[in-house]
Each structure stands twice: as structure tokens, then as C-alpha cells.
Image (cartoon, grey):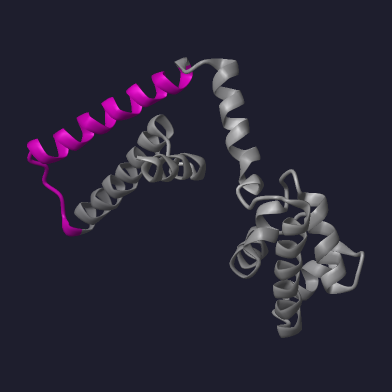
Amino acid sequence: MKFSKNLLGMVKTIAPAVAAAIGGPFSGLATVILREAFGTDDDGEIERQLSVGDPDALVKLKLAQQAMETRMRELGIQEDQLYVKDTADARLLARATGTGPQMTLTIGFLSIYGVLLLSFFLLDFELNDWQRGQVGILIGVVTAAVGQIINFWFGTSKGSKDKALQMAIRE
């Protein structure tokens, strides 16, 4: 079952376990639960009901969330298992290609970022207010990407956080 980005965002808000399962290893379970909650086998009908903002559809979506949680407990599925596939694919890619391409991109990006940042602060450019604002936005966007690069190398996945918490409890 596929939803548009807007609808998937709404599903994530109202039924996060269902949204996490869609497109993952438990997508079949999520599809069955959604079809039961909406009383139809037509995926297009489910999407249509959600897209028109029908209040009954939101209630059905909430019921699907509750049914998903119940079925997960019955089957012994932990919520973290819904997110495992995403991180597993990233690990497989890194193993298959090595870290050479990622290292090259990281070094290149951070080098260019450093040069741009230093040149902006050390060189005296004649910029009007609009240009200064645009450069500020550009620096903000690129600076946000630095955090993603650091997260790639040092990790902030749910699994890492859970491991860190478990280790802290043991100590």
C-alpha cells in the first residue's frame, strides 16, 4: 500500500505504528489492518477517504493504530522491529561499497563548507540587505547538513540510543 507524502505524514501523526510498517517488513500486516478498519479491499478508497479529510476516516485510522498495536503484541513484534529494515539497508550498503565514497564526500563537503564559512567571515564583501539575508539562509542550510554528516559517522539511530541507555542502566 502506498500513500502520497501528505497522506503518509497524516498517517504518521495519527497512526505511527501503521505508518512505520507501511513499506517495511510488516507492510502486509499494516495493509490488512487498514483494510479491516476502513471496511474495504480498495486501497484507492482508503486513500480517497483520508484525502478528503473525512472525520470518520480519522477515527478509522486511529482504530487501525490500536489494532496494529494489539496485533504486534500478539505476534511478539517489538516496535523497534518496524524501523530495523531502514538501518539494515544502510549497513549493507556501507559493507558492500566500503566507506571510501562516504569519506570522500564528507571530506569534500566539510572542506568547501569551511572555506566558504571562513571567506564569509574574514573577507569584506559589499552585500545589500537582501543578499546578506540570502547568504545567511544558505549558511544555515549547509550548516544543518553538517549535523547529518556527523550523525552518519557517529550514529544516532534508535538502536544506538537504546544500547546507550541499556549500558547506562547496567553501570
**Does any portion of residue 123 appear in the rendered image?**
no
* Residue 27, image x, y percentages: 77, 50
The quarter holding residue 57 reads bottom right
Q: In what quadrant of the picture does the C terminus appear?
A: top left
Depth order, front residue of 170/126: 170
* Residue 77, image x, y percentages: 71, 50
Depth order, front residue of 115/62: 62
Residue 97 part of the magenta-drawn span: no
* Residue 135, image x, y percentages: 25, 48
Residue 125 part of the magenta-drawn span: yes
Image: 101 above or below 8: above
Residue at 11 percent across and 40 percent down: it is 121
Residue at 23 percent across and 58 percent down: it is 130
**Does any portion of residue 7 appear in the rendered image?**
yes
Q: Which residues are magenta?
A: 101-129
The quarter holding residue 156 reads top left
